[in-house]
Amino acid sequence: MDTSLEPAADETARLRRCLNDLVSIMALPAVGAGGEPPHIVGTLLDALLGMLRLAFVFVRLNDPEGGRSIEMARVAKSLPGPIGTREIREAIGSSTGDAPLNWPADARVVIGDFDLSVASAPLGLNEIGIVVAGSHRLDFPGEIERLLLNVAANQAAVGLQQARLLSEQTRRANESERESRLILDSIPGLVALLSPTGYVDIVNRPLLEYFGQTLEELRQWGTNGTVHPEDLPHVVEVFTRSITSGTPYEIVQRLRRADGIYRWIQNSGFPFRDVTGQIARWCVLLTDIDDRKRAEEALLKRERELRLLVETIPALMWRGTPEGELDYLNERAVEYLGHSAESLSGGRWLDLVHPDHRDATVRRWLHSATTGSSYDDIYKLRRADGQYRWIHSVGEPFYDAEGRIAHWYGLIIDIDDLKRTEEALRDRERESRLIVDSIPGLVAALTPAGELDGVNNRVVEYCGRPLEELRHWATNDTLHPEDRSRVIQLFAALITSGLPSEWESRVRRFDG
């Protein structure tokens, strides 16, 4: 699997959570419509506490008539002890000042034994109040958390103003819609929001540009060729079932891009539910995976070709893990050994090694597996018919892009016939040597070029010289000085003609 896709997956999940939270926040005005301010504030507190995983969330709501302010808070279980609204208000005031209008956007607050990061956002233009969120995390608030906190405050302000002035509520709702559209258009992905019945309500600008269609045309996706004809029945079936059941869906399909080319798309749909559990909207995220899909298909093709090549090579092939465990044998190796790779895993392949060679084989393999050096060993291995045969096993490590051993690849070569031939040749050489040494005379063997290749023991004993000295007979004192030049000439003529010859000369015996 291509590990470069992991950051994109994390970003997709991050965007999904953001959209989910944004849609939940945008439902706050509807939840509080027609309710009293404490009810609206309570909904805001509950939403933010869970959504942002806060230690506490605090709201101060001003009285437009100049009366006493309303203060409410929610405290998570991560902040134990008798901590309530008053304690939170006093802690914030102690750290940032008593005037809520002057509270900074970000600060540190100590509550009990806890040092918390806090972020504040005004409700409206501070004339309504302020919301303060506290977290145990040092890096709070992050960019999205700041965004969610601000949007939540704005949405809550819309609900509160609805109870005060209907026209103000309408203005805030329109502003919120504009911000939501801006957020959707700024998301680096293809995003659509659907109604609970699956009707396409909103799509972001990147999606319109990708397909080169208007919103009205995209609403006809099932009949206008946007979906590849071969994929359409499956897409309609999965989409309809998901909309009916209210469960998320994920489809890999081909969609027609603006240039008319069908490309592979990952179509993911997620339902957003309101506080009553009813689906408020569907969020659809379309991800172009065409390049990845084609790369995967090419990789699968190469893997099939490689496996075919491995299985057709007239050799016994094996593969090992980076730790040295056997994990693959080609068919020829399975037939030769009478075992599959699975049956020989966990070091059980050593049971096939001849007991006399097993310890040395283990040492040599462990040395290669731990050092990464090439593996080269000769030992006896039990074949499927139960016969131990000489084999030559070689292996090389295969490294990944990071320079780590990904696998070991190797060959097993049956050299039993060669071994037996070598042993037979050595036996014949020993027999020949025995015959030559038993001849009652001085015998020497020469190469075609005339070099002394060997002598029997009687020559060595007679001359009192080892074979290496006897090879220099033409330059040392092995021959009588008066005979040396004549013998050299006769010897040269013999080698040149290749005809039998004989001559007499004086040779220095061991006694001088």
Image: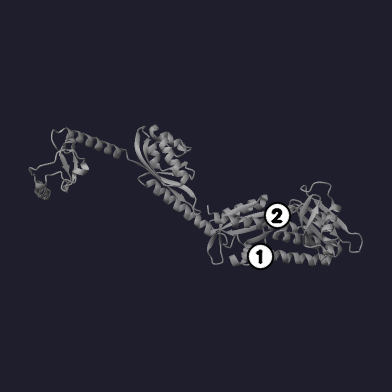
The quadrant holding residue 341 is: top left
Is 342 displayed left or right of 64 in the figure? left
Q: Position of residue 142 (x, y in %)?
A: 70, 59
Q: Which residue is mark 1?
A: 186
**Real-space Cα distance between discs 2 and 1?**
20 Å
Element under disc 1: helix
Q: Residue furthest front?
A: 512
Mark 2 falls on what kind of element? strand
10 Å crowding of disc 2: few (<14), some (14-19), many (20+): many
Quadrant location of the C terminus?
Answer: top left
User: Position of 347 compared to 89: left or right?
Assistant: left
Residue 488 spot, x, y in % from top left: 11, 49
| Mark 2: amino acid | Phe
**Quadrant of the rendered structure where residue 207 is?**
bottom right
* On screen, residue 168 above or below 419: below
Front-lying residue, 497 or 276: 497
Q: Amino acid at mark 1?
A: Ser
Quick check: 406 above or below 35? above
Classed neighbour count for the residue bearing mark 1: other residues with Cα under 10 Å, few (<14), some (14–19), many (≥20): few
Q: Residue 386, image x and y in percent?
A: 37, 32
